[in-house]
Amino acid sequence: MSIKIPRLIRDRCGVYYFRLIVPLALRQSVGKTEFRRSLRTKDAAIARQRALELSLAVEAINVNPKISDFPHLLAANPNIRKKINVDVERGIFQSDTPEEAEQVARIAASYAEIKKAAAQSGIAAVLPVSKCGKNLKEAAIDYLSEKKTTIKAATLLKHKGALKAFTAETGNLDVAMVSVLNVTDFKKKMLANKRAATTINDQISALKSFFDYCIGNQLVNMVNPALGLLIPGANNLAESYEPFVEAELQKIFAPGLYLKKSKLPDLYWGPLIALFTGARAEELASLDISQIFHVKGVYIIHILDGKTVNAKRRVPIHEQLLALGFLDYVNCVKGAGYSKLFPHLQDGKNGYKKNMCRQFGEYLDLPEVNIVDPLKVFHSFRHTVVTALTNAGVNDGLKRALVGHDIDTRTSAHDDYIHASMLTVPNLQIAINKLHYEDVDFAKLKREQDSFLPIIAKKIIQQKERKARDEAKAKAEADEEAKKAKKGALTESRTSQM
């Protein structure tokens, strides 16, 4: 049987409130008929717990002064204490003489003031405050400043976007005033706009992380309003990218078309390296030349950073890449004084990969290739490699070590005993060289690697010129704004002097 909790109410939106009714005798003194504070939840169990805690705290407040609390009123005549009968709680005020009646009136007035002060200060101490003094935009600046030290730029951008969208929807509220209802309404709007469930969960997760920061840094004392609002099973509904089949690989790497369209080194080498390593686009686009070296005679690509904790790994360079002249290209770029494998790629909000992936997508859309399935993208090479390694009989431990997948202990009890860092490079080389795509003639894709250098140099010069133009344009716009502001201030000054 459920127990009815006193002072607990719910509004028409389903949010629970703590409601404290001021006794009739005190309403004139206190100046209110009730105190009401949001419990910031729609969950009945949570609301009952919070209401009980507040009720116990309110009951503990001492708002019942006794006649002995007024010795200063009785100092004139110590015998008056025996002649006056005062029971303030029951409303009894008795006296025998006019002098005594005057004294009783003074006692009653003082009692009312003490009662009012005790009630107001006691209730204020128990009930939660409405504001913490910092709004969402201000708190977001501090949060993002700390968060950028632990997450990647692309993820930080998502968090920034989520906070910006939430603030635009709810208004720039004081952080302490944000309720579950605000986050729920934000979620409902995303659902109404037909946003993907995984996208909604990304936004809610970012908000939860933000409010965890606010609570952890003692900015507010509240239950996280984004807690428990993720859409269950969203990841199960997300469509995974598909691998390229042999026929599609033939079209992608058709020698005439591929050599014609792959003038830039990232467009030439990017898909080839991905097809023979399973590396992620950003892992390849951001490579430093120093990450390519040999270990005991085996040339490897040492991936130092990536999407997961297991992304750091050593991937032997496939024999097909060596045959196409990959090391010749590395030496050409290094000899020209560059430190990056693809020197013309610039680090942006989404890392180095943006242009490489975009242009590869445009290549797939060409009539000659015509691979328009949205689940067939640059990342499909990664799925292609894992599938091909499986077909070649490579065990799960070696596969995960090569592609940098997380260990899943649900699959096998032995998985957490596999330490990828201790798998030998020769064994990894044997495994990676089992990748074969028999219907593709890679030998016809070979080209002179020093031919990329003039193209790289030209691209870098164009980027510098574009940057200089953009900076000059920005400066001109800033100067123009400054002139307008100065002119406006001068006009305002002359007007005020007239």
Image: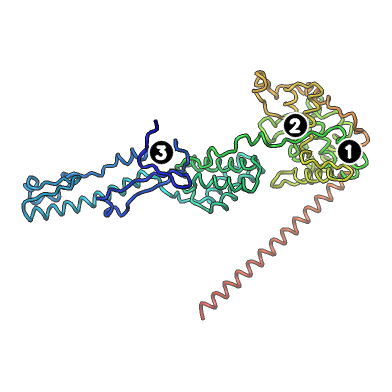
Q: From the viewer's perspective, tell me whether residue 37 is left or right of residue 408.
A: left
Which one is closest to the eye, mark 1 or mark 3?
A: 3
**Mark 3, secondary structure of its residue:** helix
Residue 160: percent from the left, percent from the top?
61, 47
Q: Nearer the viewer, residue 241 or 329?
A: 241
Determine crowd level at label 1: few under 14, some 14-19, many 20+ residues with C-alpha closer than 10 A.
Answer: some
Quarter of the N terminus within the rendering: top left
Q: From the viewer's perspective, tell me whether residue 286 is left or right of residue 19.
A: right
Residue 213: percent from the left, percent from the top?
52, 41
- Location of residue 376 by image quarter: top right
- In the rendered structure, which disc, 1 or 2, sits on the residue that comes first in sequence? 1
Which one is closest to the eye, mark 2 or mark 3?
A: 3
Residue 223: percent from the left, percent from the top?
47, 40
**Mark 1, secondary structure of its residue:** helix
Tell me the residue that label 3 is attached to: 50
Which amino acid, by three-letter code, is at mark 3?
Arg
**Mark 2, secondary structure of its residue:** strand
Which amino acid, by three-letter code, is at mark 1?
Lys
Which one is closest to the eye, mark 1 or mark 2?
A: 1
Whether residue 243 is situated above or below residue 100 in the rendered picture: above
Tell me the residue that label 1 is attached to: 251
Q: CA distance from mark 1 to mark 3?
A: 65 Å
Name the residue rendered at 70%, 24% in the picture.
420
Q: From the viewer's perspective, tell me whether residue 7 is left or right of residue 309.
A: left
Tell me the residue that label 2 is attached to: 302
Q: CA distance from mark 2 to mark 3?
A: 54 Å
